[in-house]
Structure formats: structure tokens, C-alpha cells
Amino acid sequence: MGLSIGELVAAKELELLYLQGKKIAIDAYNWTYQFLSTIRDRFTGEPLRDSKGRVTSHLTGLLYRTARLLEAGIVPVYVWDGEPPAFKKKEIEKRVEIRKRAEVKWKEALERGEVEKVKTYAQAALKLTKDMVEESKKLLNYMGVSSVQAPSEGEAQCAFMCRQNQVWAAASQDYDSLAFGSPRLVRNLSVTGKRKLPGREKYIVVKPELVDLETVLNELGIDHSQLIMIGLLTGTDYNPGGIKGIGPKKALELVKKEGTLENVLKAVQDKWTHSVDPHEIFEFFQKPPVGKVDIQEENLQPEKLKELMVSEHNFSEERMQNVVNKLVEKKEAGTQTGLGSFLK
């Protein structure tokens, strides 16, 4: 879900090539879930699978999206979630139950032939397993792309790496990186390109968006701690939905009027219905578990890449060979550019 502040945040649209040569920390779980959700059979809602029945939608998405980033000269660093905060446990348990119920409804919708409901329930039933994560890390490693293991939330680690100037920006569809203090956030990087509008024979071009934290705070007339307060009111991963009846604009007005966390909480004390103490959430955004990491430069391993994707997961040998050839050409040329036909 993430921080519900999109209505307040001004983003600058970018061409993909603007990010050429820049190192970008990517919220790996956020992207992988997205690929699992969208890369599915349109009628059955089933994800892509190999001959052994193992899900491969996440590998498909990671392979071709990472290829596109490399084509544009971007240096991706994927950051994987570690242990969630203890207070998130109940929310995680709720999500598990929601997935179980969605799986039942998915099967029922399939039997009734309700295509739109099939898609909705199939997406709600998705789950990312440890095996999927390990396969994803292996794929990236063989492509010569770095992965980082966060001690806790991936977006917190991305933000920390950006503040430490280890990367230029954090990339995610959510706004949590801003609440965690990332100076720059890049959105739409995982969906950049031509996209078909649902249920219509019409296409749009989706471009990356840059959100600058300092600009956002200045334009809203608040400081970083007050941005977190707005998140508490409108909803975060730890208190989904926020407080009923309070949207982003009303939250901004309230935070500017009350000023401090204690005053804001007093103003809504009868409306906070979440089991988690808001002080815990606030403190977590301000001081999340993060750590200095050594971003290892990985080597392209063409044969292992082909073995993983073709021999192990039944990807097209011809298409994978084309991918490998382009990666090798890039490596030999000593540049991140020149992959114009990479996805053709």
C-alpha cells in the first residue's frame, strides 16, 4: 500500500535517458510483487509457469525490465527486505488471511467465468515466496547486477543509501522512501514505456517521474517530521487507510495547524482505530534499522544466465541468446548504452 500522499506531491516527468549513468536503488520487493501481479493470463489469472509448474512471472519482469534499465545506461541496485518491524506482524497476518480468501474467490470466479473478477482475485491472492526471492537474486547476479540485503524495510535502506550518496535516487511506486528521508524518489521506472489502458483499445506512454524531497517540503510548507505525520493520518503500510474521513489535503491542513505529533494525535485521538501505537510508526520512519553496505560490482555470467532461464525455467533459447549477446556486447564495449535492439 505505502504512504498515501500522492495527491500532495509534485513530480517532474523525465525521459529515461535523463537517468543515464546514475546508480538507482530499487525497492526489489515492490517491483517483484508488481511483476507477479501484472504478468498473468488475462482469462485465468494464472501467473506464467515453467514445465515443472513453478511461477516465472517475476523472473520475466525482472529480466526484461532490468534489460531496459541497462539499455538506458542506468546502474540498478536491487534492495531486498529484511525483517519487518514487530508491530507490522498483525498487518502481515491480516494480509495472509486476505490472500487465502482471495484464492477461494478466484477459483469460484473461474468456475463462473467472471473474467474481471478472476483478474482482481488472482492479483489479491499472489504471494512472493523465499524460493522466488532467491531465484530473483540469482538472475540479477548472473546479469551482472548488484543486490543488497536490507536489515529491515527495503525502502528505508534505499533512502539511507541515497542520503549516504551511495546511489543517486531510490526507485519505487510507493512514497515511503520520502517518509524514510530519501532526497530523491524515482517513480514509474518499473512501468516505463507504452501501456494499454484497461478495457480500451488505447495506449499511453508512461515516463519516469522524479520527486525531490526538499522541493516537496518547501512547497507544502512543512518539515520532514510533519510529512510523516501526514502519512500517519492518510495511511501507511503499518496503518492502512489511515484515519477515516481524513484525506491528504485535510491531513496537511491539520498538521500545519497543530504543528507537533502530540497535538495532531490529540486532535484525532478518538479516531485512531489501529492496533499499532502511532508513536511507534513515527519513530520507525525517523530511525529505521538500516546499515552501511558495500555495493559489490557483479560480473556478467552468460552461461549461468542461459542455464537458469533456458534449462531450468524453459525460457526461449533464441530470445535468451539474443539477451546474452547484447549483454556481452555491452560488457565488451565498456558502456551501458548501445542496446537499442535488446528487447526486439
Image: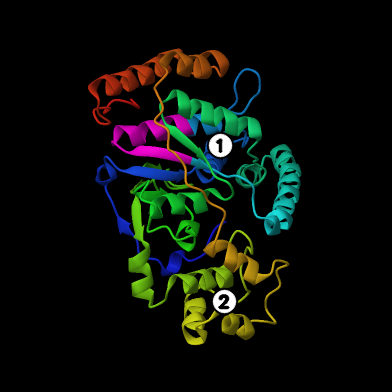
| N-terminal label among 1 and 2 | 1
Quadrant for the C terminus in the image: top left
Disc 2 marks a residue whose amino acid type is Ile
User: How many other residues sit within 10 Å of disc 2, few (<14), some (14-19) or many (≥20)?
Assistant: some
User: How many other residues sit within 10 Å of disc 1, few (<14), some (14-19) or many (≥20)?
Assistant: few
Q: How many numbered circles does the render carry?
A: 2
Q: Is residue 200 left or right of residue 18?
A: right
Residue 44 in sight? yes
The Cα atoms of the two marked residues, 1 and 2, are separated by 36 Å
Q: Nearer the viewer, residue 125 or 232?
A: 232
Tell me, yes or no, whether the highlighted magenta stretch contains residue 63: yes
Q: Is residue 343 above or below residue 320?
A: below
Q: Is residue 265 left or right of residue 258?
A: right
Q: Which residue is mark 2?
A: 246
Residue 316 in sight? no
Q: Nearer the viewer, mark 1 or mark 2?
A: 2
The magenta region covers 62-78
Secondary structure at numbered mark 2: loop
> Residue 73's spot in the image, x, y percent?
28, 36
> Residue 323's spot in the image, x, y percent?
37, 21
- Look at 38% across and 78% down and name the residue there: 221
> Residue 231's spot in the image, x, y percent?
53, 68
Q: Is residue 247 above or below residue 43?
A: below
Q: Which residue is mark 1?
A: 42
Secondary structure at numbered mark 1: loop
Disc 1 marks a residue whose amino acid type is Arg
Q: Nearer the viewer, residue 52 or 103?
A: 52
Tell me, yes or no, whether the highlighted magenta stretch contains residue 41: no
- Look at 38% across and 71% down and name the residue there: 217
Q: Nearer the viewer, residue 160 or 57?
A: 160
